């Protein structure tokens, strides 16, 4: 094997990891957006997709003990019971916890890696449209959730 093929293999592996993390973040954003907007059917689909991604090793483990993993599990349990309100409460609780933590540390984010389950981005943002068509993003509310595992 030549040096260039070793470099290409490493680059392909890094790209695959980056793509899987981006896919996980995108699905997580979709889940949070659907839960925030009260869309039970879409939230259930996003949760199912997220669970599949976690089962295949993408994103943090569903069994990890992080606030994010615990919240995603709570959201999933609520969605499985058809309880969009319970899912919204779990998401709101996570957001409040993170806001309190940011206030305690002066609003600074910690940029560390916390093991193999971490995501290489310390925050993810979900913007949910308040328009009735879903195509007009002129009025949005932002939801920021720290997904550091």
Image (tube, rainbow, N blue to C red):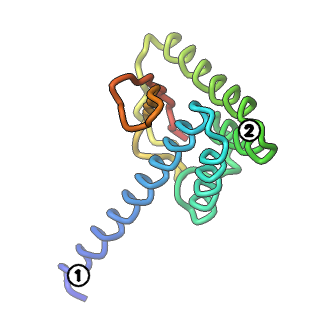
**Element under disc 1:** helix
Name the residue at 43% across, 37% down: 134
Split into 4 quadrants, where in the image is the N terminus? bottom left
Q: Can residue 108 be seen in the rendering of this structure? A: yes
Q: Please give left or right for residue 83 compared with residue 72 in the image.
A: right
Foreground pick, 25 / 122: 25
Q: Position of residue 74 (x, y in %)?
A: 74, 38
Whichever of labels 2 and 1 marks the residue nearer the N terminus, that label is: 1
Quarter of the image with the C terminus is top right
Vertical placement of 76 versus 103: above or below?
below
**Badge 1: how crowded within 10 Å, few (<14), some, or many (20+)?**
few
The front one of 75 and 44 is 44
- Frontmost of labels 2 and 1 is 2
- Visible in this render: residue 123? no
Q: Which disc, if any, is residue 74?
A: 2
Taking the view exactly as shown, the residue that stands out farthest to the bottom is 1
| x 46%, y 47%: residue | 25
Left or right: residue 149 versus residue 1 is right
Q: Which mark is drawn over residue 5?
A: 1
Rendering quarter of residue 73: top right
Q: CA distance from mark 2 to mark 1?
A: 45 Å
Q: Can you give x and y, in whole percent of width and height, for residue 4 in the image?
A: 18, 79
In the picture as drawn, the residue positioned furthest to the right comes out as 81
């Amino acid at each position: 094997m030549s040096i260039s093929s070793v470099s290409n293999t490493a680059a392909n592996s890094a790209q695959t990891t980056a793509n899987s993390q981006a896919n996980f973040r995108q699905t997580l954003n979709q889940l949070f957006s659907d839960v925030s907007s009260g869309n039970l059917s879409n939230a259930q689909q996003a949760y199912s997709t997220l669970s599949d991604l976690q089962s295949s090793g993408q994103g943090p483990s569903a069994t990890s003990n992080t606030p994010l993993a615990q919240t995603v599990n709570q959201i999933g349990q609520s969605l499985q019971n058809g309880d969009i309100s319970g899912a919204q409460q779990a998401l709101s609780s996570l957001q409040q916890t993170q806001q309190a933590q940011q206030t305690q540390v002066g609003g600074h984010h910690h940029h560390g890696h916390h093991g193999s389950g971490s995501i290489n981005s310390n925050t993810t943002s979900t913007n949910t449209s308040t328009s009735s068509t879903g195509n007009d993003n002129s009025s949005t509310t932002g939801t920021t959730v720290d997904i550091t595992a």
